[in-house]
Image: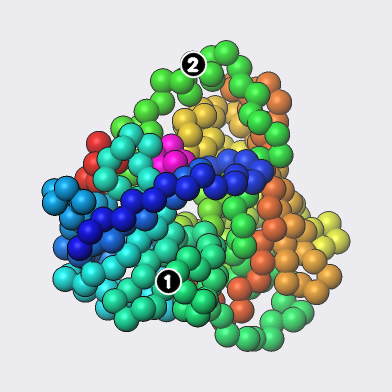
Amino acid sequence: MRAIIVLLVVLVGAPFASAHHSATAFFDRTTMAEIEGTVTDIFWRNPHVFLTLEVVGEDGVIENWELEAGTTNTLMRRGFTADSVSIGDQIKAAGSPSRRGEPAIFVSNLLLPDGTEVIASDRDAALRWTIEGNPIGDVYTADDLSGLGIFKVWGFRELYRLRNPLVLTPAAQAVKAAFNPRTDDPGLSCIPPGMPNAVLNPYPMEFIEEDDRIVQRIEEWDATRIIHMTEGGLTQDYQPDHLGYSVGRFEANTLIVETTQVNFPLLDGDGTPMGPNAKILERYTLSEDETRLLYEVIVEDSDNLLEPAIWENVWVHRPGVMVMPFGCTLRDTVSPVYQ
């Protein structure tokens, strides 16, 4: 099978900030690479699915290419399961190539042997080779959850965005400059992120009302966050963790959450440090038809930020979707991209 490598410059829209594992640090999202080969290995686990392709170049030299896809949960919601591809299958793949030139792609599109094209990333993408195929976006079933307000399942349709570039103190700039994403990113070791990173991800989450508190279940990293709806304050035995201590209140159709005591050293997945005295303010504003949540999160951290960091996005209701177990699992072998 001959390799087909095509690099195309694509238009880049408004910048988004990557708060969890940053694919942009490892892969060039401004170009597209396309290859064709034989599947020799499949890693069907979270946080990302990996396929290995044996690709024969025009010079006859055989290379093993790594394809990094989305989570098992996202792919299964799109109808792509562990049985959709097998070792020995000849497939075509397209996506963002490695920044350092390793034989690796952060894959967006796969063309299977039966001619079915699937979107294999956590982000939506257009079909590349076919007119019909795996739908763009997740597959949902209708439901009627009107009147439940925020207490249902939500997910991103687009990735969150920084309102303005981060303005860091000189000390924070030095710490960030020394950050090596291949060795210092906790996510590569299956260490769950702290707030606000824990919420800033493209996977489903839901709110559950429980007496005087709200439970926020977040699919990524199997996070369960408690939002206290009373002003009782911290108890003496409280031990700060990566999600911090959160107190919420409703103002009309907006859930406002204030979080402190976050015990996690990073603000995002790009190495920006965060101090123990950081304060996080979130606003979840429910649309009139109860299908969207306008989201804003503001982080103040005088130790590292000269101006507040503000992310925003719109969560959309996911009819028929459940928050699934995540179960991060490390591979026995490390992709060349992360070495």
Quote the CA–CA distance across marks 2 and 1: 42 Å
From this viewpoint, is residue 258 visible?
no
Q: Residue furthest left?
A: 61
> Does the magenta-highlighted stretch encompass residue 26?
yes
Can you identify the residue that label 2 sits on?
174
> Observer-nearest residue: 277 or 185?
185
Residue 43 picture quarter: bottom left
> Observer-nearest residue: 92 or 227?
92
Answer left or right for 197 relative to 100: right
Please rate how many residues cluster around mark 1, counting C-alpha atoms within 10 Å: few if below 14, some from 14 to 19, many from 20: many
Question: Residue flagged by tag 2: what amino acid is it?
Answer: Ala
Residue 321 picture quarter: bottom right
Name the mark on residue 118: 1
User: Quick one: quadrant of the C terminus?
Assistant: top left
Total number of numbered discs in the rendering: 2
Answer left or right for 89 relative to 25: left
> Observer-nearest residue: 55 or 278?
55
Residues rendered magenta in the picture: 23-28
> Does the magenta-highlighted stretch encompass residue 184?
no
